[in-house]
Each structure stands twice: as structure tokens, then as C-alpha cells.
Amino acid sequence: MSDGAGIIGKGTFAMGQKRIISAWIQGGECLDAASMPIPSRVWRLVLLGAPGVGKGTQAELLSENLGAVHLSTGDIFRAIASLPPEKRSSAMEEALGYMRRGELVPDDLVIRLVEERKACLRLPCGFLLDGYPRTVPQAEALDRLLSQEGLRLDAVVDYELPLETVVRRLSGRRVCSRCQAAFHIETRPPRQQGVCDHCGAKLVQRQDDRPEAICVRMQVYQQSTKPLLEYYRHRGLLVSVPAEGSREEVFARTMQQLHDMASAQASRL
Ligand code: AMP
């Protein structure tokens, strides 16, 4: 892989990124972002793929290597879910109802949440949007937001995996109740059963990883998110990556595809 893909040392951006992610989740300003180092190649990416294909894991690896900050709309809703009930507004409660059933939160609410956090999108380190957009109206809203900011997407990475594998992955997934780190009871078990390797907090199964919610999420994905593939293919941004194999293999494939895309874009200039 050449330097043209902008690979940087692991962990270089970790501290600055933590502050940005908490601003993203809580909806505050991205303080101190100006002091963050800028990677040699700035990437603004959207990650697509059915729930359970491993987008979150790939986002972590990509973020460490490309220096772009990992922004997940699912994390915003999980943070709302962990607030005490008296601190949640009625709009928040309504959003959590959709999430618990495995349904999509209505577009207008999600679009508003992302607009409120647009400072995180204009950061010079770039971004990896995970879980947004999920529908064509959300993609159109993102296009409008980016063009107001004078920015554009570099690529949309779609992770592909057979349905049976997705269901197996989701039902074995466990997440840390404090730091949200992801584990899997078969393929990525924690060192001590039920305990997070990173912060020692309890591992839990997400409510929307229960079998009944998984079925709904897969149907929702087929109906709402698949049309996005066409939307981005049409714009020449779509990169399809088979998500079988180890996290390292999938990551290497992603980097190769991004590198190929960067080379193709450079040769057109
Ligand atoms: P995720 O972690 O991305 O799978 O998101 C978990 C849940 O949060 C989803 O099942 C939805 O209920 C909600 N959610 C996250 N992002 C979006 C979005 N862009 N549009 C609608 N609902 C979303």
C-alpha cells in the first residue's frame, strides 16, 4: 500500500478523537479540534452494510489508520438510552422506542441530530460516517449539508455478507456497557467472560441484537438502505467490499479498494 492512501501510525489521533466523539454524541461543540494533526490524505467516507457485517470494527481500524474520526448515529441513540429516564425528552423517548424494536428512527429527527453536529463533519481530519445515511432522504440531506460546508464525500464503502452469517454475528455480539467496545462470544471473546478488556465494565447484549429485533432490522435494511447503493453507485462513489474473513483481511481489502479509488481519481485530474 502506498502513502497515497494516507496511512498513519496507530493511535496517533486517539486523544483528539475521543474529545470529538464525545462532542458528536452529546451534541456539543468540537472543542480543541483545531489543534488536531491533519492526516496526509484526508478521507470523508460513509460506511454501509447490513447490521452485523462488521462496520463498527472496520470503522475502528480505518479510523486508527486514516486519522478520520468515527461518527456513528447508533452511538448517539445508545447514549440517549443510557440517560436516566427523567433526563430524556419526549422526542428522545420516541426515538428509543423505534430503536428497541429494531426500526429506523424517523428521518426528520435523525437529520436534525446530524445537522446539530455538523461541526464534527467539517473537521480537517475527515470522518467515517457509520450508520448514517440509512435512507435516500438522509443521503440527500447529507449532500446538502456537505455542499453548504464546501465539502464532498470521497467514497461510500459497502460491506457485503450473506444473511445467515449476519444473523450469527449479531446474536453473538456483546458490547461494553461503559465504553461501547464490541466483542463476540465466538470470534472475538473478551479475556474474561462478560467483562470488557478495555475498561473492566460489564458486557451486555444490545436490545436490538435480540432475535426478534434482528429480523426487523434485516427487513428494514433491505427496504430502506439498499436503495442507497444505487444512489451512490450512480454518483461514482460506491466501493463494494466482501466482508468475509478476519477483521484484518476485510480491512486490507478496504484499504486496497480505497487506494485504487484514490489512484483512479488522481489519474482523472
Ligand atoms: P446502529 O448501531 O447503527 O445499528 O444503530 C442502532 C439503531 O439506532 C438502529 O437500529 C436505529 O433504530 C437507530 N439508528 C441509528 N442510525 C440511524 C439512522 N441513520 N436512521 C434511522 N435510525 C437510526
Image: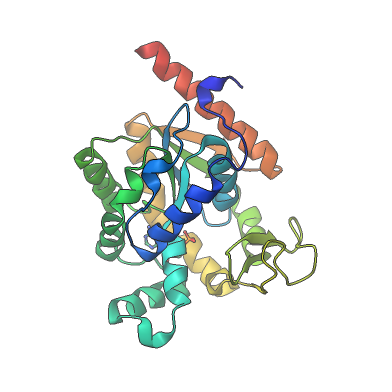
How many labels sit on residues?
0
Residue 242 higher or lower than 261, as above or below: below
Q: Residue at x 80, y 68 (%)?
A: 192
User: Is residue 49 something one can see in this rendering?
Assistant: no
Residue 259 vs residue 42: left or right?
right
Q: Residue furthest bottom?
A: 86
Image-quarter location of ligand 1: bottom left
Q: Position of residue 256 (x, y in %)?
A: 58, 27
Q: Position of residue 114 (x, y in %)?
A: 31, 56
Comparing 122 with 232, the one in front is: 122
Comparing 117 with 173, the one in front is: 117
Q: Residue at x 35, y 73 (%)?
A: 95
Residue 119 higher or lower than 198, as above or below: above
Tell me the quarter of the image containing the C terminus.
top left
Name the image quarter holding residue 166: bottom right
Name the image quarter holding residue 8: top right
User: Is residue 114 something one can see in this rendering?
Assistant: yes
Q: Residue at x 44, y 41 (%)?
A: 36
Residue 114 vs residue 196: left or right?
left
- Coloration of the structure image: rainbow
Q: Residue furthest left?
A: 148
Comparing 234 with 154, the one in front is: 154
Q: Position of residue 177 (x, y in %)?
A: 59, 72
Tell me the quarter of the image containing the N terminus.
top right
Residue 223 vs residue 170: left or right?
left
Residue 65 vs residue 249: left or right?
left
Q: Residue furthest right?
A: 192
Q: Position of residue 241 (x, y in %)?
A: 56, 36
